[in-house]
Amino acid sequence: MDKLTEIMAWKRQEIAAQIRDVSLKELSELNSSLPVPPSFATALRRDDGQLAVIAEIKRRSPSVGAIASKASAPEQALKYQAAGASALSVLTDYKFFGGELNDLREVTAQFRKSSPALPCLRKDFMVHPIQVLEARESGASAILIIVRALDDEEISTLFAAAYAAGLDALFEIHNEADLARAVTHGAKIIGVNNRDLAVFTTDLAISEHLIPQFPDGVIAVSESGIFCATEASRARASGANAVLVGEALMKAPDTGALLYEIATA
């Protein structure tokens, strides 16, 4: 069993007890009852010519192990806010990444007290609309849809749920087949994961190959393998509007300096 298959199998088992019918009407009513979250899509299209940086809060990962195991999510969010991040990615999977849904709640609550609020992606392995409902209740602006991990019915269901809940959806792809499926589903934001989640090898050439094939108007994100201006410059040259950076920023001695270096590459 490859790593992504293992993670998805665990995720389905983990949420099994929570699963119930979640209608689009319920999600729409929830959306209407809550404050409008900042737009994830808008944040990824900067008007100053810089790359948008999606700064990730990640304590550990299957590929490298511990990164910052004791990191406080709200404190890290404030660092990223001060450093000029365009948006945040908050890991809410505990077993493999050391995150919790409460991290997202605490980060968005923190932003309500210290503007400007940055839009937050709920970074998790989404399989059911109940997770979309949780994301909206927790203040997220977007959810993740990993194309290769889901069948077309699941993708359609999650995308419709996100729309009803007032959330953007980041479609994550790794190859041309994934891209074709994302486009067929009408994805407006597509992220190329340069890391193969099956075996956890990373190659920035995947973004360089796939992003030029994106339809006009789609927001392009390059994810994984971005550690400094060199990789960020390659992502920008491929056509990326944004980069998602986790490990490098979590470990950086000067978060602001590294984020600026990446954004202006």
Image: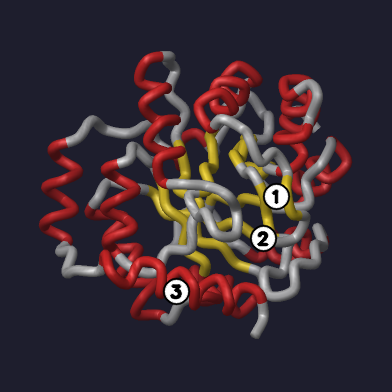
For disc 3, the marked residue is 184
**Alpha carbons under labels 1 and 3: distance apart:** 21 Å
For disc 1, the marked residue is 239
Q: Earlier in the sequence, mark 1 or mark 3?
A: 3
Q: Earlier in the sequence, mark 1 or mark 2?
A: 2
- Is the residue 30 above or below the residue 77 in the image? below
Please state which amino acid type lies under the numbered disc 2.
Asn
- Disc 2 is placed on an element classified as strand
Identify the disc placed on residue 59.
Answer: none
x 32%, y 55%: residue: 132
In percent of width and height, residue 28 lies at: 16, 50
| Labels 1 and 3 touching (C-beta < 8 A) | no
In percent of width and height, residue 79 lies at: 62, 21
Quarter of the image where the N terminus is located: bottom right
- Disc 3 is placed on an element classified as helix
- Disc 1 is placed on an element classified as loop
x 80%, y 58%: residue: 204
**Alpha carbons under labels 1 and 2: distance apart:** 15 Å
Binning the other alpha carbons within 10 Å of mark 2 as few (below 14), some (14 to 19) or many (20 upward) gives many
Please state which amino acid type lies under the numbered disc 1.
Gly
For disc 2, the marked residue is 193
- Is the residue 73 above or below the residue 186 in the image? above
